[in-house]
Image (tube, grey):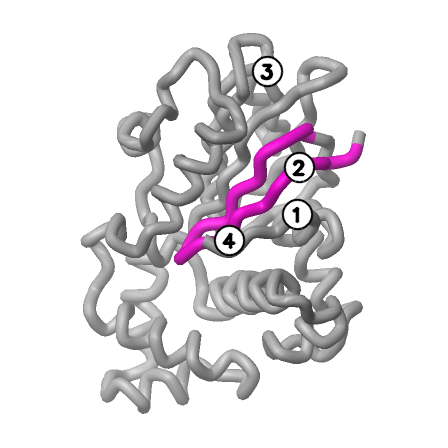
Amino acid sequence: MAWTGNVWLGMGALAFWGEVGETAPHTHAAHQVFLGAGPASTVRAHLPDRTLGPARRIVIPSGTPHQTSPAEPSVRGLVVWLEPDRWPHVDDALIDGWPGADSPMIDEAGAARIAAWVGDSRHRDPHVHDYVRRALAVTSATLTESPTLRAVSAEIGVSSSHLSRLWRQDLGMSFNTWLRWARLREAARLVGEGASITDAAHGAGFADGAHASRVCRSMFGLSPLELTSGLTLI
């Protein structure tokens, strides 16, 4: 079953609303949250050691290998990918704070409100060290220049070993894993502004479109075309 719907891209969050399809086994840097449109809109998440669901709400932490599938022939819902640089800790208590997330029914307008809320930079998690925040700013500004941990560390005046430890501690992933996600986000933004997937891939620092496609599938279990269809910047 294909994914069909709308995609919103915000500051540190990517959200999909529509008909939910299956994914191939994959692992991605972002936390993933599924919220079904109604009580019968459920999915399963197959992890290496267990299966979650079928459930209307499922949270898959960053770096967890998984494969998702709709539990019914037709399932609509909201899927949100959250960057750990902004959201190091994702649980039910956090999701309950999203506007309308605990509603018995979620429609497209409700999904758009949630996407806008999680994409708003004012809702940044406060637990990220200042060195990491500064390193994130430097890395984001130099994606096409193949930034390295050593170069970024030198730019902000801290040892690479110390930054690496803080990065893993605060973001729950390695520098290179985060870099792949950041490039996918930038490529999606460029596609949303009208660039071809090939041009967007180059503009985000990928070697070529094929490289971007491989990384996209490994991070989200979706192709760039599936991911960017119906893209809206928020």
* Real-space CA distance between mark 3 and mark 1, rounded to the nearest whole angstrom: 21 Å
Q: Quadrant of the N terminus?
A: top right
Q: Name the foreground residue: 180 vs 5.
A: 5
The image position of residue 87, as x and y in percent, is 33, 48
Bounds of the magenta segment: 2-20
Secondary element at tag 2? strand
Secondary element at image label 3: loop
How far is disc 3 from disc 2 in space, using C-alphas? Answer: 15 Å
Q: Residue at x 49, y 45 (%)?
A: 81
Q: CA distance from mark 1 to mark 4?
A: 11 Å
The residues bearing labels 3 and 4 have C-alpha atoms spaced at a distance of 23 Å
**Which amino acid type is shown beneath numbered disc 2?**
Gly
> What's the magenta bit mostly, secondary-structure-wise?
strand
Q: How crowded is the residue under tag 1: few (<14 C-alpha within 10 Å), some, or many (20+)?
A: some
Magenta stretch containing residue 230, yes or no? Answer: no
Where does label 3 land, which residue?
41
Which residue is identified by label 2? Answer: 5
Say which residue label 4 marks: 9
Of labels 1 and 2, earlier in sequence is 2
Q: Which residue is mark 1?
A: 230
Q: How dense is the environment of label 2, judged by Cα within 10 Å: few (below 14), some, or many (20 and up)? A: some
54 left or right, relative to 92: right
